[in-house]
Image (cartoon, coloured by chain):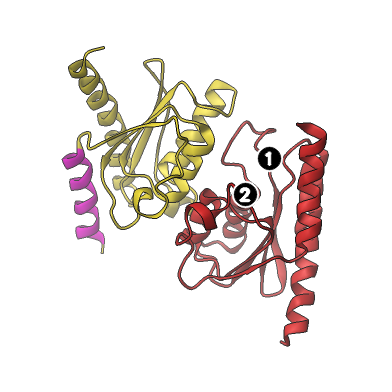
Chain colours: A red, B yellow
Amino acid sequence: MSTEEQEKKDEFFMSRALQEAEAAYEEGEIPIGAVVVCRGRIIARAHNMTETLHDVTAHAEMQAITMAANSLGGKYLTDCTLYVTVEPCPMCAGALGWSQMARVVYGAPDIKRGYRTFAPLVLHPKTKVTAGVLADDCRDLMLRFFKERR
Amino acid sequence: MSTEEQEKKDEFFMSRALQEAEAAYEEGEIPIGAVVVCRGRIIARAHNMTETLHDVTAHAEMQAITMAANSLGGKYLTDCTLYVTVEPCPMCAGALGWSQMARVVYGAPDIKRGYRTFAPLVLHPKTKVTAGVLADDCRDLMLRFFKERR
């Protein structure tokens, strides 16, 4: 696949993660969404549900990892890519590390809470990371949420 | 409460976490157990179920945090103590951070996978940590598991 083809594909799947983030926004949740893609197919989609479930572990990525493993019938996600609208926190990056996710693609960086600041070595050593896909859209949705709600 | 009373209490609750770890052992799971205590009462107990559930997120601590929040009807655990037989990994420490757990007590250290190595600042700044409670028992169960299974 050419770089251009890969970029188009990444933007396509990130737009699906953004749809999930928008669903979170509508529910009054911090608007972060994720999808897991395995061999070109979306096998899990989720958005942050920490308020609805009263559960700090209900981040988009955590749910997507659990769903993807259920879908595949195994706990390792070595053939999968996770797309998430915002840089994962250390909890989610830790889960991604355990899952041996092949690739992580995220939109907006999170300097204050992201794993790169607090746990930079927590992903699996083989995991490839791509940052900044549709970053402006991902960030704008977050900014809109915090401006309106807080 | 005197230091001696606190130590006795910690050993009591850690022995309950060890019972959970032993249940994990019997199920062929890496033997780690946890309980959450709120105002002197156990409100959640769980053990590692990653193999049974094919889910890398099903660590003892993650389940115990979710259960405790369900029990209390709110996502913050600022009046709670988590007892866990082994030092939490970065994923679990990240979840403990989000939950604002008042206190974390663990048994055996985990140099290779523990949060202190990979994400030392990930707990909430107010969280108090006590290490080494019934550490030998907690470690021996892990060593027995890995000797027999691997």
Dot 2 or dot 1: first in sequence order is 1
- Name the quadrant of the C terminus of chain B: bottom left
Q: What numbered label is drawn on residue A63? A: 2
Q: Is residue B70 above or below residue A106?
A: above
- Name the quadrant of the N terminus of chain B: top left
Whether tag 2 and tag 1 are in contact, CB under 8 A, the answer is yes
* Residue placed most toward the observer, A58 or B118: B118
Q: Is residue B143 in view from this perspective?
A: yes
Q: Residue type at mark 1?
A: Met
* Residue placed most toward the observer, B59 or B53: B59
**Residue drawn at the location 55% of the way across and 61% of the way down:** A73
Q: Secondary structure at mark 1?
A: loop
* Magenta-tinted stretch: B135-149
* Horizontal side, residue B7 vs residue A140: left or right: left
**Residue drawn at the location 51% of the way across and 51% of the way down:** A90
Circle 2 residues within 10 Å: few <14, some 14–19, many ≥20:
many
Q: Is residue B143 above or below residue A40?
A: above
Circle 1 residues within 10 Å: few <14, some 14–19, many ≥20:
many
**Residue drawn at the location 20% of the way across and 53% of the way down:** B143
Q: Is residue A116 above or below residue B10?
A: below
Magenta stretch holds residue A149: no
Q: Is residue B146 above or below residue B97?
A: below
* Residue placed most toward the observer, B25 or A57: A57
* Residue placed most toward the observer, B24 or A87: A87
Q: What numbered label is drawn on residue A68? A: none
- Residue A135 image offset from top left, x and y in percent: 75, 61
- Residue B125 image offset from top left, x and y in percent: 45, 34
- Residue A30 image offset from top left, x and y in percent: 72, 41
* Horizontal side, residue A11 vs residue B143: left or right: right
Q: Quadrant of residue B7?
A: top left
List the residue tagged with mark 1: A49
* Horizontal side, residue A46 vs residue A25: left or right: left
